[in-house]
Amino acid sequence: MSLKCWQVIKHLESWARPELAENWDNAGLQVGDRNQAVNRIVLALDVETDVIDRAIAAGADFVITHHPLTMSAVSRFTTDSWLGRTIARLCRHGVSLYALHTNLDKVAGGVGEILADRLGLTDLKILLPEGEKFYKLAVFAPFEHSEAVLKAMCGAGAGRFPNYSDCSFQSRGIGQFRPLAGANPFVGRIAEVESVEEMKLETIVRKRDLPAVLSAMLEAHPYEEVAYDLYQLENRLPADAGLGRIGRLQARLTAGQFVSLVKERLGLTAAVVGGRLADRIETVAVVGGSGATLAGKAKIAGADVLVTGDMKYHDAQEAYRQGIMVVDVGHFASETVVLGELCRRLRQAASEEGWGLADGDIYVDDAFAGYMKIW
């Protein structure tokens, strides 16, 4: 049995969970079929014509990028536009396209962490932690069926904490309803008011588990119409993910020494420096991509310098006022470092899970080097 796209996606999303992506993001399967067979995978930072050209020439059928194909809603896809031509070409050659974007920025082992590791930072912490979101779910079930309903919910992930499972609260009461014409009630008669002894089952559900828990609950419940309440909570578990990282250098450096270190570790010939130059640098914050607006938060977190991309003039001005130095290494250089780790993870999965792919069938397209260069 050949490897399918959905298997690769399932592995990736068990790590870089989709719910970590920002609301404005467009991470996930961009083009293609989840059931398509996968024989070769190409990794790249961006969807570009030459990246696709090389993937097709190499016989790849799955391209995984960091940046999505498009971030905004599109009303039509025709070959009059680059976007339409790209989608048509991917479909014509049977190439699926998937993007890991802001969820890859935030996850442990993602963009922020790899960038920090590349710079040699230790004692890493999340710059902007993002705790797991919870919902409270309450459902009303007939007393004699309540145990089965609760078991189904907990089996799908409800009531689960790091050191506990099957957590719930139960209270007994009387449920009342009147079946109307066309109904097929589990108990009661059409047009007659019916009272039933019920249990109210209350539990906590992680956002990522909510679809599975609701599906299991509805499947196990005997009623035609299931009464339940769902509340989004302010509760949070300690963050295991978030944007950016902050850590310490092994030795204090001057501003000049630090910039030289950054250029060396990221393979750059130049970097843009803004804000207020630091006399000595020991604590460093990093944010992949466009993170210059977070200079103030990096300062509050105790950073002497922020390493990121896409710094504008007014970003540098604000960083100067905040009293923090910013090193702009460019959007591409701040994020492309993660592709090697992504490749390593997929190769390891291929070996451990028996995907039938050799290391050479999963590789990074490093021929594309971004859109901006310093001459």
Image (cartoon, grey):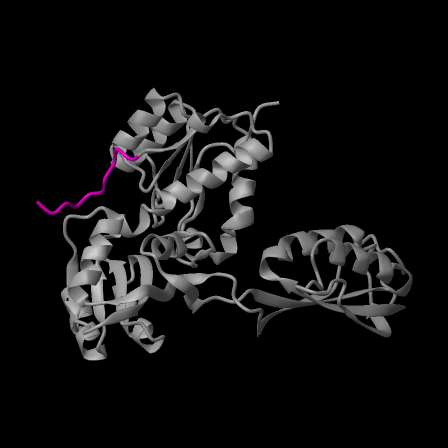
In screen coordinates, is 364 left or right of 50? right
Furthest residue in direction front, as rendered: 251
In this orientation, which residue lies closer to the viewer: 333 or 182? 333
Q: Which residue is painted at 37% across and 42% down in the image?
A: 339
In this orientation, which residue lies closer to the viewer: 228 or 76? 228
Q: Which residue is painted at 41% across and 28% down in the image?
A: 95
Magenta range? 366-375
Does residue 53 lie above or below 319 as drawn? above
In screen coordinates, is 142 left or right of 100? right
Image position, residue 300 (x, y; %): 33, 77
Image position, residue 285 (x, y; %): 32, 65
Q: Quadrant of the N terminus?
A: top right
Residue 170 showing in the rendered view: yes
Image position, residue 313 (x, y; %): 14, 66
Q: Quadrant of the C terminus?
A: top left
Q: Which residue is painted at 26% across and 50% down in the image?
A: 265
Furthest residue in direction left, as rendered: 375
Q: In which quarter of the image is residue 179?
A: bottom right
Does residue 49 lie above or below 298 as drawn? above
Q: In which quarter of the image is residue 364?
A: top left
Looking at the image, how many numbered discs can be counted on the residues?
A: 0
Does residue 275 lie above or below 147 as drawn? below
Q: Is residue 247 magenta?
A: no
Residue 194 showing in the rendered view: no
Image position, residue 296 (x, y; %): 28, 74
Q: Does the magenta stretch include residue 373?
A: yes
In screen coordinates, is 236 left or right of 32? right
In this orientation, which residue lies closer to the viewer: 265 or 167? 265
Would you say the magenta stretch is mainly helix, strand or loop? loop
